[in-house]
Amino acid sequence: PEEARKDTLDLVSRLIESGIPSEAIEVAFSGNKGFSVEVKSNNRITRQEFKTITLKLSEGLKTRDSKIHNTNRIFRIPLTKHPSSGLYKIIISINDLSNSTIEQIKERAKSWENSADLVETLIDLPNKVLAMAKSTPEVNKMDYTEMPLKPDMSKKPRNVPACKWAMMQGFIKPGNKHNAIMALGAYWKNLGY
């Protein structure tokens, strides 16, 4: 938890350096071992832009939770009790995050009444942050003009179906890569690999 507190302080500093006012940053202790940081924005950004921004802002932080990008993930709301620790998810000020030990924060989290107020400030994200969303790395796309019209079946093992052999050679139409990988995975799993 202490490393998570330090990483959270680092993230808050990065947000402020990016032009986000400190009064617009909401920090919460999860009630167990982590922290959450939220900025409420007027901007509409896509899921991919959100992921790109958060990954860039949290780059190098050891306790970063990549599960926040999972759209099916359920986030606990403040003032709810953590099921395993019995501590509450509480809002804490940046000052408390900076000046309190993890033990002091956990002591405060024993009661929901020790939570600071929710941050209700809505902001327009600074251009520096929005630019992060636009600078997605280039992805090398397969050149399908080079794909042979027919896969080479001359070295296909007898026990491997032709369609599976073709997929293993990369003979996959655009847009079907994920399905092909799942089909191959299921095939090999069923064979006991």
Image (spheres, rainbow, N blue to C red):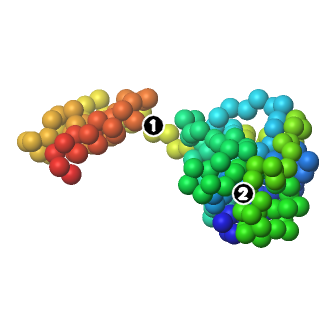
Kindly state the secondary structure of the residue where label 2 is placed: loop
- Residue 138 vs 61, above or below: the answer is above
Q: Where is residue 154 in the image (x, y as percent from the top left)?
A: 14, 42
Residue at x 40%, y 36% (from the top left corner): 178
Counting labels gives 2
Q: Which of 126 and 131 is in front in this view?
A: 126
Q: Nearer the viewer, residue 83 or 39?
A: 83
Q: Mark 2 points at which residue?
A: 110
> Which of disc 1 and disc 2 is earlier in sequence?
2
The image quarter containing residue 31 is bottom right
Q: Where is residue 152 in the image (x, y as percent from the top left)?
A: 21, 39
Residue at x 68%, y 63% (from the top left corner): 4
Pick out the residue farthest to the left.
158
Packing grade of label 1 (10 A; few <14, some 14-19, many >=20) is few
As drawn, the label of residue 143 is 1
- Residue 180 vs 91, above or below: the answer is above
Q: Where is residue 157 in the image (x, y as percent from the top left)?
A: 11, 45
At label 2, the amino acid type is: Lys
At label 1, the amino acid type is: Asp
Gap in angstroms between the C-alphas marked 2 and 1: 58 Å
Query: Is the N terminus in the top left, top right, bottom left or bottom right quadrant?
Result: bottom right
Q: Is residue 130 left or right of residue 173?
A: right
Residue 56 is at least partly visible in this image: no
Packing grade of label 2 (10 A; few <14, some 14-19, many >=20) is some
Q: Position of residue 100 (x, y in %)?
A: 82, 68
Q: Nearer the viewer, residue 181 or 66?
A: 66
Discs 2, 1 touching: Cβ within 8 Å: no
Kindly state the secondary structure of the residue where label 1 is placed: loop
